[in-house]
Structure formats: C-alpha cells, structure tokens
Image: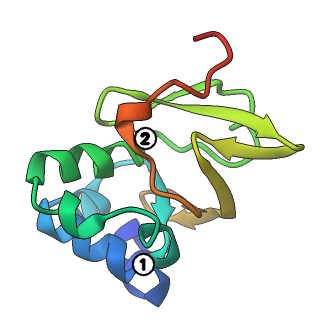
Amino acid sequence: MKSILTTLREDPAFETLLHALNKVSLLEVLANAEKITLFAPDNQAFTRINLEEIQLDRSKLTDILTYHLVDGEHPFEGLEAEENIYTRNGKHLTAHLEAGELRIDNAALTRTDIRCSNGIIHVIDNVFLPQFSGWYCACC
C-alpha cells in the first residue's frame, strides 16, 4: 500500500495541492505521518480561492493546509457522527448533512476512503478556510 504522498503524486487531480504543500514544507508529513486523514481539495477546488494571493503569506497558507489534516484515520462511515473534527491547526471542521448529503465545512466529499499506508484521503470539492472554523455548527 502506498503512502498518502505517493498516492497524491500519482493522481494529476492533486497537482495544485502538492505544489501548495511543497511551498510550506508539508510534503514530508504526508510521507511519514502515522495514521492521518487528509481532506484533499482537487485542482478544481483551488480555482474557487485566490491561491496566488494566499501563497504570498506562508503562515496563512500553512494554516489553510493544516486545516485539511486530521490525526488518526476517519473513514467516511462514521464522519457523520463526528460533529467536530479537530485538525492539525487546532481548529475544528464541522460535519453536517445538507439535502441528505454529508458535507464537511463548506465541501462535499467527491471520493472517499482512499486507503493509504499511513492514513486515508477524502477528496473534497472546496478548500477549507480556517477563519470560518465552526460556523457551520448549529450550536454556535
């Protein structure tokens, strides 16, 4: 079984994500981490944000990318029960149903449970933005 990093590198849908991860030295985390879940925005998801501007601020880019990393394996079945999913940047993602479809923060899951030697990848159609952390939660 391949690592998360190798799996991403073999799929052209993740070129933008890999480029961004490389800019903030996070590629090694995906190669060596023990059991993580990556909510991976595909290339199309990155067209919805101004990545060029965000990349000018290394700290902001790091915050955004670590907001997509969750310690431990979180398979699709069970995500709905996890109302708050705590990320590596210290903020939480919110799982909720919208029109009967599970969404994590502002993203739909387009592919789920891509199993890797060091965790799981879920492909999402939007980039998570940590400044909006938790606003999807009905309790907030």
Q: Nearer the viewer, residue 3 or 135?
A: 135
Whether residue 83 sits left or right of residue 52 in the image: it is right
Determine whether 102 is above or below 127 in the image: above
Residue underneath mark 1:
14
Residue at 79%, 37% in the rendered image: 97
Cα distance, mark 1 to mark 2?
A: 18 Å
- Report whether residue 115 is seen: yes
Residue at the farthest right position: 100
User: Callout 1: few (<14), some (14-19), or many (20+) C-alpha neighbours within 10 Å?
Assistant: many
Q: Is residue 22 left or right of residue 117?
A: left
Circle 2 SS class: strand
- Where's the C terminus, which quadrant? top right
Q: Residue at x 28, y 66 (%)?
A: 51
Residue 45 is situated, as x and y percent measured from the top left of the image, at: 50, 68
State the residue position of label 2. 70
Amino acid at dot 2: Val
Question: In terms of secondary structure, where does tag 1 sit?
Answer: helix
Compare residues 18 and 118 and report the one nearer the observer: 18
Residue 46 x %, y %: 42, 69
Which residue sits at x=21%, y=58%?
54
Q: Amino acid at mark 1?
A: Phe
Query: Which image quadrant for residue 30?
Result: bottom left
Which residue is at the far top? 139
